[in-house]
Amino acid sequence: MLLEACDVTKAFGSFKAVDAACVTLEQGDILGLIGPNGAGKSTLFNCLTGDLLSTSGNVLFEGRDITRLTPEARARLGIARTFQVPQTFEGMSVLENVMIGAFLRTSHRAEAEKKARAVLERVGMSKLADAPARSLGTPGRKRLEIARALATEPKVLLLDEAMAGLTQREVQLAIDLVRDIHRSGITLVIVEHIMEVIMSLASRVVVFHQGCEIARGTPREVTGNPAVIAAYLGTRAAKAAAGHTPIELMGGPAP
Ligand SMILES: Nc1ncnc2c1ncn2[C@@H]1O[C@H](COP(=O)(O)OP(=O)(O)OP(=O)(O)O)[C@@H](O)[C@H]1O
């Protein structure tokens, strides 16, 4: 087992944003975490990366208990993430942003630069190396986040809505990039609302609703699951949708 969340609960006061979540990740997996707005996906994600400390439960990485480790310590072990809202350093160049990731593994500037340039080549951003990060649009920023994460040489990469705000064509390019990252041996966790992304990439999916797991299985299994459809659409709409392909219906969260 590469990464494991055992009974992870995160409470904000008396409200449990994540309630006893159990998620396992094997080497080579692409695990999708889905659910309507407010389901607790990002909160669980943050408990895995260390950006939030869980209230109870444990997070294990390669069998080691990392529940109380800082995000940086987890990154050193090989856990990298992107943020829903890209955390680019606006005043720095694209190359310098990626070097920040590379500095996790080396303190030598020349080596960090070499690694960063190699990553930029890999994600198709070489020509933008010297451009200021602030000049990038949404697709560029999202890709830069992935590049910075890759520069940390992760074993696991967690993508938090890495494709939100992209056009159809940009989503397709991003899916190709994620496939390429996976082929290079990196295991992935993907939080994503765009069902096309989940259907194309995820080998397994866990569905959350109001902090609790409501389904797990292959993308096709969960998108056909009545409890999942009801969570997204409400029970009445789910009944109305019976007999139709539910996948198209899952593009948007329940109001
Ligand atoms: N710091 C916080 N303090 C209080 N409540 C919070 C905090 N962070 C998240 N929540 C609440 O926890 C619940 C789960 O939020 P979370 O962001 O994990 O959901 P999500 O599934 O990622 O949703 P989305 O798809 O909209 O990003 C929500 O009701 C949210 O308002």
Image (cartoon, rainbow, N blue to C red):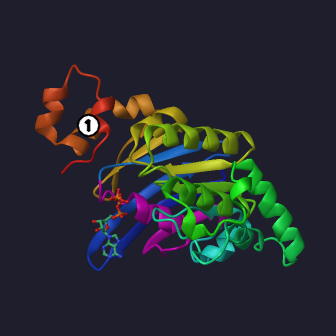
How far from the left and from the top, in percent, is residue 229? 26, 37
How far from the left and from the top, in percent, is residue 213? 36, 50
Depth check, front residue: 63 or 147: 147
- Assess whether residue 44 is covered by the magenta stretch: yes
Rendered view: 184 above or below 145: above
Instruction: Tell me which corner region of the image, top left, top right, bottom left or bottom right, holds residue 81.
Output: bottom right
Depth check, front residue: 187 or 195: 195
Q: Which residues are magenta?
A: 37-64
Left or right of 185? Residue 81 is left
Residue type of the residue flagged with mark 1: Ile
Task: Residue at 72% x, 72% y: name it.
Answer: 96
Left or right of 126? Residue 172 is left
- Assess whether residue 68 is covered by the magenta stretch: no
Asked if one can make out residue 147 in the rendered structure from this viewpoint, the answer is yes
- Label 1 neighbour load within 10 Å: few <14, some 14-19, many 20+: many
Task: Residue at 72% x, 39% y: name it.
Answer: 183
Left or right of 56? Residue 30 is right
Q: How many marks?
A: 1
